[in-house]
Image (cartoon, rainbow, N blue to C red):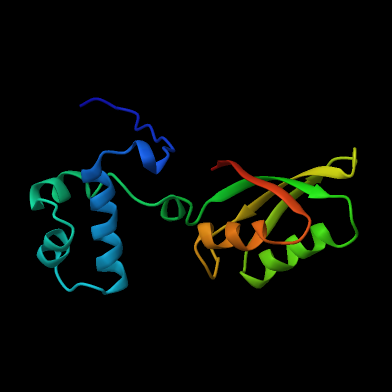
Amino acid sequence: MTDAKTNYYLVREEILPEAIKKTIKVKELLKKGEVRTINEAVEMLNLSRSAYYKYKDYVFPFYEASKEKIVTLALLLEHRSGVLSNVLKVLANEHGSVLTINQGIPLQGVANATLSIETMELAVDLEALLDKIRVIDGVKRLEVLGQA
């Protein structure tokens, strides 16, 4: 028996084959209760059952992969009072646990900040949390650096 290491990759959706995209959509329809059976979902999306079963255990949305993980975020924030505080409020409201915060000295009106958060208790999925942070006034950029 070999100890094969499993590698994971973060891939943008637009380069995925249609069968994989449709498999993800089938899983979402089932999870949301919009369909009752796999047959109903694959017919709705014009996907073969064999393609669904081939990929279903190997593809999942980014936010599912980040459940119960530590995620490191890089932010570019305007140098104004309360911007970082507003980011932390959103994290607290959604039950994100902040593990570390590193903020650089502001240069040219902006500061880099790095946050590591634990996602185990999040009230929303990670994508929704990131969307809430992105729309905060003063958040110029938000990227996921990695997860453990």
- Tell me how many marks there are: 0
Q: Quadrant of residue 36?
A: bottom left
Above or below, 85 against 23 in this view is below
Q: Quadrant of the N terminus?
A: top left
In the image, residue 70 lies at what x, y percent? Answer: 58, 49
**Along the horizontal axis of the image, is 111 left or right of 12?**
right
**Along the horizontal axis of the image, is 79 left or right of 41?**
right
Residue name at image x 58 percent, y 59 percent: 131
In this view, the residue in front, 120 or 128, is 128
Residue name at image x 61 percent, y 69 percent: 94
Q: Quadrant of the C terminus?
A: top right
Residue name at image x 27 percent, y 66 percent: 29
**Along the horizontal axis of the image, is 100 left or right of 44?**
right
In this view, the residue in front, 119 or 63, is 63
In the image, residue 124 lies at what x, y percent? Answer: 52, 67
In the image, residue 93 lies at what x, y percent? Answer: 66, 72
**Which residue ends up furthest to the top in the rendered image?**
2
Q: Quadrant of residue 46?
A: bottom left
**Along the horizontal axis of the image, is 107 left or right of 21?**
right
In the image, residue 20 lies at what x, y percent? Answer: 25, 44
Above or below, 134 against 124 in this view is above
Above or below, 103 against 36 in this view is above
Q: Quadrant of residue 133?
A: bottom right
